[in-house]
């Protein structure tokens, strides 16, 4: 058991190392950060000096080593663009991303489960047909396009909702939230739909197929034979059994939400981590870019690690297999 | 339990009040958006026009430019030259900084020293100045090293900071953002200008309030009914335009030119003016063999006939019409009419591919040649498309340009190392003066002197150099203009480079907004009126 754990952790660390190394090398090709920092009248001597001071003249392996040493001690360096510690920037931007991902996930779940149940129970109902074909949009359209279409529809053609930003934000200690004001809620509607649509579709289809599967099983037939109310069968017995894969997938999708958040945040100028990353990319702000990659990498890897370990707890067969080794 | 409920109710009430408050303030609020944000609130951090323009609404300089870019008094009410190297500036009386400090000559001297301190990116504007001294609290003496006819232009983006404020807040020096440093002045500001910085979240939102005591309201420099300015950078073109169409912002630039019609249809206003920025192509006229051509042993671009052929093969009118959608003016030189050195006689050479072909044949390249062609793809309006069009126009006369269009930092890195044969570059002189274009782009590149630093093709005409040198010290405006015209004409005759067009400054706003537009793309909020 312990050795299995150690092995998994070791693998995760390896994955993180590879991610950061690849990112570090790739980022060298987005351009010269110094040229993005200086004006057109800055002398060449000064430019050379800045490059030297930032350590950009060192071989890439030396730079990477330095970066890793600092990262291990929790320092991501300072942003070239803002001149402030990268961690501070992340702290400022994290609430926006967490709020957006949270709301969109909850929204997705709240709509997807009833929709999935309905389409599972009544596969031939016109509403089911509509929901299923409609959900194709969620799977096939990229979030970028969905966002733009939503903006066009609900802020330009029908001027109901704001097209960008977070709106009124309340400061609560170190956290900022837009969920305490009506204005904040109005701002989060379109981005969260954009971000949540894919998940909504995925979970709806998952619930539907699981539901159809479960309804065919013997114990449901017995339950029916026993005369238990249909409602209780659907929601008490069937739905509960479909929840296990739904929870797993939702958890795993958190990583995906984070990744798609970059696009959604850019489209809606949502001041979160994704937008910060994209802004950093356009001026070759290396510390922010590497920091973001590392943070996202850690989140991805820890989710996967947790899921792996949870399986071990849940499924005795796996446990035995590990022990046998 | 009760306490919890109370808290909850309280929260909503506070929220509702906040909302209500926002709605009331909206009445005189001006909201606008741009692609990016100012780099810093410290006007000495970076030599970049957007940052200069932004901070110019909070700070003032000794002089200011009007809508026609003419220089007029600001914190200095008048000036005169005591001798060719000594300028005396009389300062405005009774001006106060936003936090209440009196503005005096000590602030000017302090700001000068601060601008020269380590970490400042605006040192280049002061190379001609020998010293800045306070004669009395309201008089400043500026001494130059040589007579400098464009001293006022050189200091037209030099904003004055408060000595007391900087000392109190530990912002005596300039934090070098380029080395990832910040200080108080990077996110706070205390100027004498028309607007007071209220809150600042870089890349997210900046809010400013009107300064009712600004001297410029009384002096007639600015006229505006705006009480509050809210600035949001919006990176995505589509989102930015949608924000205007939906009424979430009142004004924006940069505007994607393909959306202009859409904005006009929706009742928006479009402001257009020829920018001081010239987009042009430079050519390597130095190497004996080009680094990326199939012609070995000689450099075809050294031959004037070849350069002329390349020039005449470009149908600039078509580029302006099709690619720029009319949002550009074809260029004959490097100066628009607001700039010293402009000459109405300058004419662009006509498009004539047959003649171009003949010129190539005469130069010994009847079948053309291959050559590398470097372009940015995210710096100037539709830059990559322009280069593609030029490539196909050149193909018609047999010149096979190998187009390399890439992101700006890679592009400028490559051409900065002179690893290029033909390259695209755009230039907007910070001084709004032909001298600047000549000094940077056209005179012979000499290491160390700074002259010709952006003359990446290393075009060189010693005769022209000497004319430009004369202009540098000529204090008589008329004579000086003549010299600049003469120099620009010589470069034109040599086909030292191929000017393409002057980009247009395009701003758009909601129909209830009035504003003043400057050709150098500097946005002064004190000319904005919201009806």
Image: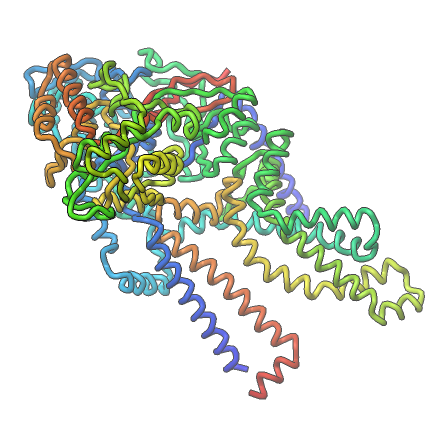
Residue B170 sits in which quadrant? Answer: top left
Residue A270: percent from left, percent from top: 51, 42
Is A16 rendered above or below residue B512? below
Q: Residue at x 18, y 24 (%)?
A: B493
Colour scheme in use: rainbow
Q: Residue pushed farthest bottom?
A: A324
Q: Nearer the viewer, residue B208 or B312?
A: B312
Residue, x 47% and y 63% (percent of image)? A298
Q: Is residue B261 left or right of residue B324?
A: right
Confirm whether residue A170 shows in the render: no
Residue A241 image point, x, y percent: 76, 66
Q: Position of residue B75 (x, y in %)?
A: 24, 19
Give B524 or B93, whichever is nearer the viewer: B524
Residue B261 lies, with reference to residue B233, above or below; the image says above
Instruction: Please name the residue shown 56% across and 21% down the image.
Output: B265
The quadrant of the rendering that contains the N terminus of chain A is: bottom right
């Amino acid at each position: 058991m312990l050795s299995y754990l150690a092995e998994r952790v070791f693998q995760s660390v390896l994955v993180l190392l590879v991610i950061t190394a690849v990112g570090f090398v790739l980022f060298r090709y987005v351009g010269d950060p110094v040229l993005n920092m200086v004006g057109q009248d800055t002398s060449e001597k000064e430019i050379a000096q800045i490059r030297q001071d930032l350590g950009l003249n060192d071989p890439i392996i030396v730079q990477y080593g330095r970066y890793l040493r600092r990262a291990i001690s929790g320092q991501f360096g300072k942003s070239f663009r803002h001149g402030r510690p990268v961690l501070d920037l992340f702290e400022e931007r994290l609430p926006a991303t967490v709020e957006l991902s949270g709301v969109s996930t909850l929204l997705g779940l709240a709509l997807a489960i009833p929709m999935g149940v309905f389409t599972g129970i009544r596969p031939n109902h016109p509403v089911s047909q509509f929901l299923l074909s409609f959900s194709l949009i969620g799977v096939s359209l990229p979030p970028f396009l969905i966002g733009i279409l939503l903006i066009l529809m609900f802020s330009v053609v029908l001027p109901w909702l704001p097209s960008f930003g977070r709106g009124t934000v309340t400061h609560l200690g170190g956290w900022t939230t837009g969920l305490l004001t009506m204005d904040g809620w109005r701002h989060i509607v379109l981005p969260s739909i954009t971000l949540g649509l894919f998940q909504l579709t995925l979970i709806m289809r998952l619930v539907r197929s699981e539901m159809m599967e479960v309804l065919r099983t013997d114990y449901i037939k017995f339950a029916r034979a026993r005369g238990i109310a249909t409602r209780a069968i659907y929601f008490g017995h069937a739905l509960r059994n479909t929840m296990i894969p739904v929870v797993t997938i939702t958890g795993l999708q958190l990583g995906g939400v984070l990744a798609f958040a970059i696009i959604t945040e850019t489209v809606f100028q949502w001041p979160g981590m994704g937008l910060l990353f994209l802004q950093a990319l356009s001026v070759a702000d290396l510390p922010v870019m590497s920091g973001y990659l590392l943070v996202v990498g850690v989140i991805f890897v820890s989710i996967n690690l947790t899921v792996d370990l949870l399986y071990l707890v849940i499924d005795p067969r796996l446990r035995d297999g590990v022990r046998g080794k | 339990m009760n306490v919890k409920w109370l808290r909850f109710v309280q929260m909503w009430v506070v929220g509702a009040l906040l909302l209500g408050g926002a709605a009331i303030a909206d009445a005189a609020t001006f909201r606008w958006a741009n692609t990016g944000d100012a780099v810093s609130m410290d006007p000495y951090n970076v030599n970049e026009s957007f940052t200069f323009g932004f901070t110019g609404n909070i700070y003032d300089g000794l002089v200011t430019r009007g809508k026609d870019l003419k220089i007029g008094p600001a914190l200095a009410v008048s000036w005169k030259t005591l001798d060719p190297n000594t300028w005396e500036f009389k300062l405005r009386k009774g001006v106060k900084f936003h936090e209440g400090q009196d503005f005096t000559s000590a602030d000017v001297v302090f700001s000068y020293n601060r601008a020269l301190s380590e970490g400042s990116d605006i040192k280049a504007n002061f190379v001609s100045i020998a010293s800045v001294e306070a004669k009395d609290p309201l008089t400043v003496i500026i001494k130059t090293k040589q007579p400098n006819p464009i001293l006022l232009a050189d200091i037209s983006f030099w904003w004055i900071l408060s000595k007391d404020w900087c000392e109190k807040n530990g912002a005596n020096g300039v934090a070098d953002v380029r080395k990832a440093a910040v200080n108080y002045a990077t996110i706070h500001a205390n100027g004498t200008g028309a607007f007071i910085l209220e809150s600042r979240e870089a890349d997210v939102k900046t809010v400013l309030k009107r300064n009712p005591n600004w001297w410029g309201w009384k002096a007639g420099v600015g006229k505006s009914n705006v009480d509050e300015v809210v600035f949001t950078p919006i990176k995505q073109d589509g989102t930015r335009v949608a924000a205007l169409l939906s009424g979430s912002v009142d004004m924006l630039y940069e505007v994607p030119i393909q959306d202009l019609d859409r904005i006009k249809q929706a009742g928006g206003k479009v402001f257009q003016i020829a920018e001081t920025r010239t987009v042009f192509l430079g050519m390597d006229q130095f190497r004996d063999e080009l680094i990326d051509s199939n012609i070995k042993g000689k450099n075809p671009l050294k031959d004037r006939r070849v350069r002329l052929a390349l020039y005449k093969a470009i149908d600039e009118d078509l580029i302006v019409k099709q690619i720029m959608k009319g949002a550009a003016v074809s260029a004959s030189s490097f100066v628009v009419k607001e700039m010293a050195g402009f000459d109405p006689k300058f004419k662009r050479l006509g498009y004539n591919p047959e003649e171009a072909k003949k010129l190539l044949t005469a130069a010994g390249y009847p079948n053309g040649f291959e050559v590398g062609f470097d372009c940015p793809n995210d710096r100037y309006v539709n830059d990559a498309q322009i280069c593609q069009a030029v490539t196909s126009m050149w193909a018609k006369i047999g010149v096979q340009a190998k187009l390399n269009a890439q992101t700006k930092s890679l592009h400028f890195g490559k051409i900065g190392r002179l690893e290029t044969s033909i390259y695209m570059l755009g230039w907007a002189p910070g001084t709004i003066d032909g001298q600047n274009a000549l000094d940077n782009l056209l005179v012979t590149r000499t290491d160390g002197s700074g002259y010709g630093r952006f003359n990446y093709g290393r075009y060189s005409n010693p005769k022209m150099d000497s004319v430009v040198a004369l202009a540098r010290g000529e204090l008589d405006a008329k004579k000086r203009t003549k010299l600049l015209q003469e120099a620009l004409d010589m470069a034109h005759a040599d086909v030292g480079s191929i000017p393409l067009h002057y980009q247009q400054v395009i701003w758009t706003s909601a129909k209830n907004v009035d504003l003043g537009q400057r050709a150098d793309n500097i946005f002064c909020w004190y000319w904005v009126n919201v009806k």
